[in-house]
Amino acid sequence: MKVLVTGGAGFIGTSVVRHLLAEGCAVVNLDKLTYAGSNPPLGGLGEGGRYALEVADIADRAVVARIFAQHRPEAVLHLAAETHVDRSIDAADAFIHSNLVGTFSLLEAARAYWQTLSGEAQARFRFHHVSTDEVFGALGAEGRFTEETPYRPNNPYAASKAGADHLARAWHRTYGLPVVATNCSNNYGPWQFPEKLIPLTILNALEGKKLPVYGKGGNVRDWLYVGDHAAALCLVLRQGRIGETYNIGGGEERANIDLVRLICRLLDEALPHAPHRPHERLIAFVEDRPGHDWRYAMDDGKLRRELGWRPSESLETGLRKTVRWYLDNRGWWEPIRSGRYRGERLGRGAGPAESAR
């Protein structure tokens, strides 16, 4: 199978590209290579002509149409998106452009290409739209999001993804485009840009800096190791029912403060002679971000029942791997911390002019 992966140089996309190549698929990676694009070397996985990188914006319909015509994929795995809630609060423009306009343009290019196919080629084609649990809004102390939970996005990022989800559904129902969709819980693992909570905590701790925790740290998230997510996405792409949505969860709910304390304990174990040990003393509670959803939790029973998927990593085993990866890959993150992102606070709602200072 030849798969067009959008956003394949990003955090989750990197893991998905590796998983597909390891399965024997051919991959065309369509990525804009924004600030968060890691695009790591693939080693032997990229050999044999099974991998191609196309640097382009998914909102550029003419370029995307050329990519479809040239590479003739059998499926699309659409991951390309702006994803950081805090950045969306400061400046939503890029989120509307990539997540809404970009998804619309990609759907239109995919529809035009799909309509040129015939027979078995058209029947095999799939468009897998990848989304997030944030579109559902916030949960209270009980319950979990199901595939039937109404959408109630509470921040610009979530709203842009919710709009993209509705577009994908509409292109299936209106035009017959063979769409399957997934909504996932919070991902973590190697190659994650250090603006997100887990890598930010790890790297701040290594440098002896404060570990910022929003509010009182009581907000709860369900955590999913990125390798498990990649495996689930590829499974749904191959075997998911057209027109259906599948939730993907890690089954590992933690309050943010408990997650940060766990990371500190793992760092204490990995670095017994660190000058900042015990790392928990670096924790600092900071002003909460606007519109901070209280709790997310995913009911992924449908995926487990229909396709037999299970995560292979617990939160602790996945975090151990993640901590070790950042310890062993200073050559990747140190240039980021000294240039593109130094760990500064985002998400104050300052607007693009002020937040850029």
Image (spheres, helix red, strand yellow):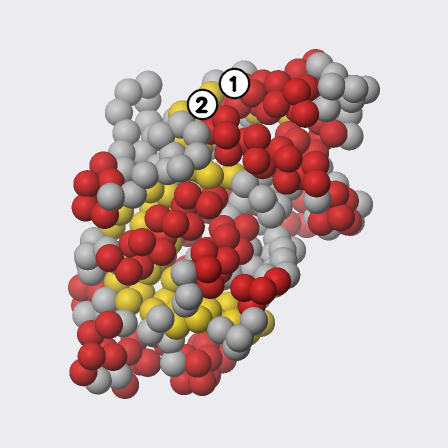
The answer to which quarter of the image holds residue 249 is top left
Residue type (three-letter) at the residue carrying disc 1: Asp
**Quarter the N terminus occupies:** bottom left
Estimate how packed mark 1 is, as few (under 14), some (14 to 19) or many (20 or more) residues with alpha carbons within 10 Å.
Answer: some
- In the image, 6 versus 34, the foreground residue is 6
Give how far apart the Cα atoms at labels 2 and 1 are.
6 Å
Helix or strand or loop: what does disc 2 sit on?
Answer: strand
Is 184 above or below relative to 222? below
**Does the CB distance between marks 2 and 1 fall below 8 Å?**
yes
List x then y, in percent, for residue 315. Answer: 47, 29
Residue occupying image coordinates x 33% and y 42%:
248
Q: What amino acid type should be assigned to the residue bearing mark 2? A: Arg
Question: With respect to residue 65, does 129 lie above or below?
Answer: above
Task: Please give the residue where the numbered disc 1 appears in the rendered image.
Answer: 258
Asked if one can make out residue 113 in the rendered structure from this viewpoint, the answer is yes
- Residue marked by disc 2: 254
Query: Which quadrant of the structure image shows residue 99?
Result: bottom left
